[in-house]
Image (cartoon, helix red, strand yellow):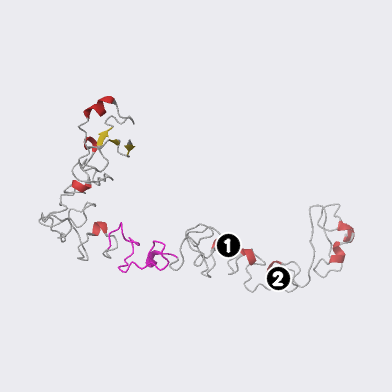
Amino acid sequence: MIANSFGCEKVENIANCDQNKDGTLDPDELAEGAQLDTDDDGAGDACDNCKDIQNPDQVNSDLDGLGDACDIDDDNDGVFDDGDNSGLAGDNPCRAGISTDCDDNCPRTPNGNQADANGDSLGDACDNDLDGFHNDLDNCPNDANSDQLDSDGDGFGDVCDNCPNQSVADDTDGDGVGDLCDNCPNDYNPNQDDSNNDGIGDVCDNDSDGVPDSSDNCPNDSNSSQTDSDDDTIGDACDNCPNNANGPNCSELYLNCDKNGDGCVEQEEVDVGNQRDTDGDGIGDACE
């Protein structure tokens, strides 16, 4: 037996329906046998919403119990899908304000007034951007793009793709912006905030100096020039001794003393007995 999602199963060319929805075919249901699958679409007649027309998906847009495949008004807005009775729905779309003797211009989206601002025969209700493409098929449903250009082939049209020349598959931080266009390719920032408009996102440039934190020699102090006079990898803007490469100034137990008063703590000063600060007053024992 092959079951489908509508509670019906095919048994030797007869589609039986699990009418009580208990997940099994009970003897009384099987005995009915009359539950043929007339249209052979996998849904037994007893539970097929279009028993004479194949519709294995059983789509029912207006939830009226009648499948779209056999419903003369799929969206239940009073305008018939094949309103001109030509035998082909959509061959004569209604114009704005006209709803009889013509076909619904948005057959699965309620639009009784058949509004069509650009007169392209596709109702406004199913063409948000009025570019002639149904919302369900439009690669930019809210941005007009009649050419549907999608340079990187990622399913998003160029006019609404924040990185039109690179697929979102090439997105290291997973924020939906391709690396080529991401102002912080290694830091998640889908909003791409860049307060100073320098091309580097705020989340990876704390001091907004245009240099990413990962390579900024003073990540918390703005210094776009990255000047480092003493070449100690600490930029002058945040170096306590910008003209001389110096060791640590102090720790929880030790304070290094600038004995020669030049404003820097040289290595030889650092090496003097660790310059303990016994009384914790901020002045090392060696120079107090």
What residue did someone put label 2 on?
236
Q: Residue at x 29, y 63 (%)?
A: 129
Give the quarter of the image for residue 244: bottom right
Magenta highlight range: 133-162
The front one of 93 and 12 is 12
Label placed on residue 204: 1
Mark 1 or mark 2: which comes first in sequence? 1
Magenta span includes 124:
no
- Percent from the top left, x then y, of residue 282? 81, 57
Amino acid type of the residue tagged 1 in the rendering: Cys
Q: Is residue 166 above or below residue 277?
A: below
Magenta span includes 159:
yes
- In the image, 270: left or right of 123? right
The front one of 281 and 128 is 128
Q: Residue at x 22, y 56 (%)?
A: 106
Numbered disc 2: secondary structure: helix
Give the quarter of the image for residue 127: bottom left
Give the quarter of the image for residue 272: bottom right
Q: In which quadrant will I find the N terminus?
A: top left
Identity of the residue furthest to the top in this view: 27
- In the image, 138: left or right of 196? left
Label placed on residue 249: none
- Percent from the top left, x then y, of residue 213? 62, 64
Helix, strand or loop: magenta stretch:
loop
Could you classify mark 1 by the number of other residues whose Cα lies within 10 Å: few (under 14), some (14-19), or many (20 or more)?
many
- In the image, 150: left or right of 226? left
* C-alpha separation, residue under disc 1 versus residue under disc 2: 21 Å
- Percent from the top left, x then y, of residue 208? 58, 66
Amino acid type of the residue tagged 2 in the rendering: Asp
Q: Residue at x 40, y 68 (%)?
A: 151
Numbered disc 1: secondary structure: helix
Q: In which quadrant will I find the C terminus?
A: bottom right
